[in-house]
Amino acid sequence: MAIKMKVYRRGSETLVAACDESILGKTFRQGELRLEVSGFYDGDVVTEEKFLTQLAGATMGNFVGQETIETAKRGGYVADDGVLWIDGIPHAQYFVMM
């Protein structure tokens, strides 16, 4: 498996969008919930180390997929109770509150 990551910068804010490469372009639905893993996440394939290095300087993160979520959890950016499951796919967000 591989992680796809795209970094967005606007002013002092940095958003890291990342997903498992295998689910890019797919849409998942469960009840009223819909999760589209779109081009928003379509950046470079990165190592776990590079992903966590980018998160260290990020003010926001948006993560989808088992490998991506597990890596974010290992880095301390996501907790189990912060993960939303949609049609068997985990999704989480990260924010730094100032």
Image: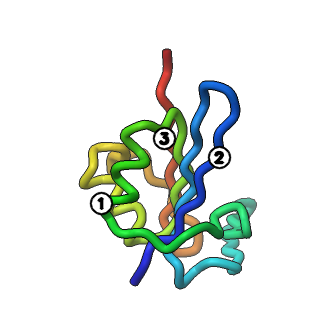
Give the number of the disc on residue 94. 3
Quadrant containing the N terminus in the rendered view? bottom left
- Residue found 51% across the figure and 33% down from its top: 59
For the residue carrying disc 1, how many other residues have a C-alpha within 10 Å: few (<14), some (14-19), or many (20+)? few
User: Which secondary structure lies at badge 3?
Assistant: strand
Q: Earlier in the sequence, mark 1 or mark 3?
A: 1
Disc assigned to residue 49: 1
Where does residue 43 sit, x and y in percent of width and height? 61, 67
Number of residues whose C-alpha sits closer than 10 Å to that of mark 2, classed few (under 14), some (14–19) or many (20 or more): few
The three-letter amino acid code for the residue at tag 2 is Tyr
The quadrant holding residue 47 is bottom left
Count of numbered badges drawn on the protein: 3
Q: Is residue 77 visible?
A: yes
| Alpha carbon separation for disc pair 3 and 2 | 14 Å
Q: In this image, 57 relative to 30: left or right?
A: left
Q: Please give the name of the residue rendered at 47% of the width and 28% of the height, measured from the top-left corner.
A: 96
Type of the residue with mark 3: Tyr
Examine the image and state in which quarter residue 38 appears.
bottom right
Q: Which residue is mark 2?
A: 8
